[in-house]
Image (cartoon, rainbow, N blue to C red):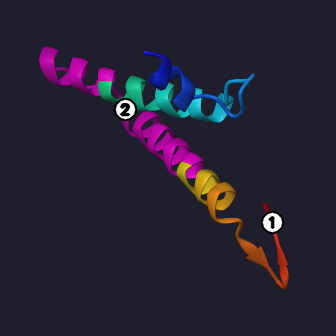
Amino acid sequence: MRKLINMFKKDDTALSIGRVCAVGAFSAFIGISVYLAVIGRTWGNYEAFSVGCIGYIIAQLGNKYVEMRGVKIGEKENG
């Protein structure tokens, strides 16, 4: 359980809100998708909901890539 909690930490003392929100968005997407499939109903706002969740998850993955790789801008290196 400690390893799972450590995955959400930005450093030793603080949780990363981006990571927590990305996991929450993914969980909501999966949960609502499965719920709608099981009960056999549709939801008028499902398309906007799913695009929003997936977009947020992709944005967080892109942010993580930038943080991990230290993307170079010009001759300077961020990181």
Q: Which residue is at 63% across, 29% downward? A: 9
Q: Nearer the viewer, residue 71 or 29?
A: 71
Q: From the viewer's perspective, tell me whether residue 52 is left or right of residue 38.
A: right
Q: Residue at x 64, y 35 (%)?
A: 18
Closest to the observer, 2 or 54: 2
Bounds of the magenta span?
31-60
Residue 42 is marked as none
Residue 60 drawn above or below residue 42? below
Disc 1 packing (10 Å; few <14; some 14–19; many ≥20): few
Q: Earlier in the sequence, mark 2 or mark 1?
A: 2
* Residue for point 49% across, 17% down: 2
How many residues crowd around disc 2 within 10 Å: few (fewer than 14), some, or many (20 or more)? some
Residue 36: say if magenta: yes
What amino acid type is highlighted by mark number 2?
Answer: Tyr
Give the number of the mark in front: 2 or 1.
1
Q: Which mark is residue 78?
A: 1
The secondary structure that dominates the magenta segment is helix
| Residue depicted at 40% across the width and 38% down the height | 50
Q: Which residue is mark 2?
A: 46
- Relative placement, left or right, of 34 versus 77 is left
Residue nearest the observer in this picture, 6 or 57: 6
- Up the image or down, 1 lies above or below 19; here it is above
Corner quadrant of residue 74: bottom right
- The location of residue 19, given as percent across then percent down, is 58, 34
Residue at the bottom extreme, as displayed = 75
- Taking the image as shown, residue 7 lies to the left or right of residue 71, namely left
Q: For mark 1, give the secondary structure.
A: loop
Figure quadrant of the C terminus: bottom right
Q: Amino acid at mark 1?
A: Asn
Q: Position of residue 64 (x, y in %)?
A: 60, 51
Relative to 77, is 40 above or below? above
